[in-house]
Amino acid sequence: MGPTGFLGDKGGIGDKGERGLRGSKGDKGEQGPKGISIVPPQITKSPTDVEALMGASVTFACAARGFPPPKITWRKQSSKLPVLRATISDNNSLVITNIHRDDADTYICQAENVFGVKNAYATLVVQVPVTFISVPTEIVKAIIGDKVQLTCRADGYPLPKVTWSRPNGLPKGAVVTSNGSLDIYNISREDFGQYKCIAENSIGSQSYTLSLSPTGGEGDETGMNVLIGRQASLRCSLCSVPGFSFTWQRMGKALQSDRVQVKDCSVVIRNVVHSDSGNYTCIAANDYNGFSLKENIPLTVLGLPRFTSVIPFSAVVKSGDNFSLPCKAVGPPKTSVYWSKEHVKVTNLSAVATVRISNVSKSDEGVYHCHAINKVGRISVTTRLAVLRFKFDSPPPLKLEETVGNTVTINCAARLAEGLPTAEVSWKVPCGRSKSHYDIKADGTLTITKASPWDSGIYECTAKSFVGDPITAKVNVVITADGQKNLDWRDTDDSCSGFVQSSYNNTVYYAVAASATWDKTKYYYCPNGFRWACTSETAVIFTIGYYYGSGGHDTLYRNKCGWNDYLYKNYQRYFFRFRDSFQTNGHKHSGKSHRYQVEYSSSTSYFAGIVCLKD
């Protein structure tokens, strides 16, 4: 056999064979565990409306299901749940003990889990027994021929119905008013006597009895009270004694008036006025022996109250000042006064009522009434209180966006009222800008000509007047080239997206720059919703003069967000700058504590970014 020959070249890949038969199906695997159903809250037991007597205890039941199991809470629709008297039981029922009238409301059962909220509602109606809130004295005096109102106001729930009764029936023409009072007109002798007021609701009833009796007498009685404008007849008690002649005097002088008629032992005074009040003297002289007797007969003319204090038609008060205005009126009869505003009493009933307001504000404006009351009736006088305060003609907008190169005008005129001169207005412009850069008019208008990004920032106008405290308005102005902030200067590649919130103050943020060199002439925009901060406003936030430890502990950016110590993208970065840093050299150091104070350096190197504040 000869020697083995050389190994030949490797042959090519043959044709692909036919696909083999499919193998048999494997055994069915075991069934996995049953999954958990996620279910939003569902109320399974809703609370029902309750009507209960004041002082009782009530329970509102509520149940719910869902997964996760919902949490059930209770609240009152118009205010907070009663303190100490409202408790939540173990089965989530709301229990209110010793219910008060103001507990009447709608109560809300709320079931909540991470997948939703369900509410159920129930109303509490509090039944309140009848109580009287305004009744006259036990004896009410009235003058024959006059009108009298017997007051009987009652409270409760349901609202009580008020009725009046009298043993021999109510006087003809007497009217029960909607507020429960009984009005009796043209009083006669037959109208005097006992009256009963009855107030009743579904809970029970209360009654009150008073007596209506005459005051002094009617126009033909001796020693009497007579209504102004009526006729008074004075008669001497010696009229029936023969042998006497009679003369009459008042205040030591003979009676002289075309309204006075003297007839022997009587005097008739027609259409009496207040000046007719006084003592009238009947002088009875014996015709035989000259012996004389004197009898004093007092006459009091009753009338509506008369104001003795001057109440101006209107009063003007500066905002913040104190205001007082007394009111006094006299009778007879005895007169009391009180002040009200919009039908609400602001002073108590007294001989002299003074409305007093400290630190007057806009809410004190309005119409004030002084009411004078006596047994004859009541009168009122009105004064209008106006509060001087100044306000902006039209407050400037909170935010104003404009395009670079345009003219921007901000109006900030303020005055006391239409037609009056404008108040003195001063402006505070964004840091880093001088007021000389702007056109500021005497009427408070500020104009920016050929606006640039550096004109962006907070503008604050302050209006001063001799009335009250100054008023201020702030405008956040944003100047952009095309309606969008140019944020190309930013770097957002680190793990914090180049934007970190201060852990010391949640309004302060730090935005990282792409370049590590600070361009003092460049305006760096903060992201939307933020503005570039000033040195001074940040300096008052961060005042701590030391920082915690070293390394990354509580630092702004050092060793955080992917930074290696101060190194990020091959550059050391220390300084976060303010919009006016080109003037102040202020900065926040990336390696210091969040709360560490503002520092100062003029270096344009080691630029980290800028400090931003929320709008």
Image (spheres, rainbow, N blue to C red):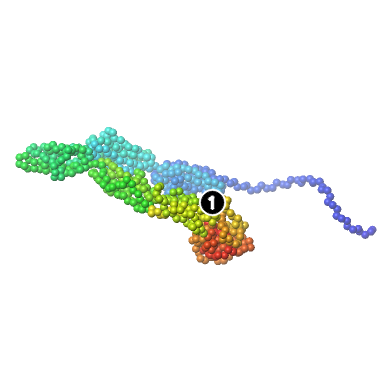
* Residue 541 in sight in this render: no
Q: Residue extending furthest right?
A: 1
Q: Which residue is drawn at 61% across and 60% down?
A: 515
Q: Which of 65 and 121 is in front in this view?
A: 121
* Residue 343 in sight in this render: yes
Q: How crowded is mark 1: few (under 14 residues within 10 Å), some or many (20 or more)?
A: few
User: Would you say 286 lies left or right of 304 here?
Assistant: left
Image spot of residue 555 (x, y percent): 56, 62
Q: How many labels does the image show?
A: 1
Image spot of residue 544 (x, y percent): 50, 64
Image spot of residue 541 (x, y percent): 50, 60
Q: Which of 401 and 74 is in front in this view?
A: 401
Q: Residue extending furthest top?
A: 172
Q: Regarding mark 1 in the picture, which secondary structure is present there?
A: loop
Q: Which residue is drawn at 54% across and 51% down?
A: 406
Q: Residue extending furthest left?
A: 289
Relative to 363, is 241 above or below? above
Q: Quadrant of the N terminus?
A: bottom right
Q: Residue at x 57, y 63 (%)?
A: 575
Q: Mark 1 points at which residue?
A: 406
Relative to 458, is 585 above or below? below
Q: Which residue is drawn at 51% across and 58% down?
A: 433
Image spot of residue 274 (x, y percent): 21, 42
Q: Nearer the viewer, residue 256 or 377?
A: 256
- Amino acid at dot 1: Asn
Residue 263 image-quadrant placement: top left
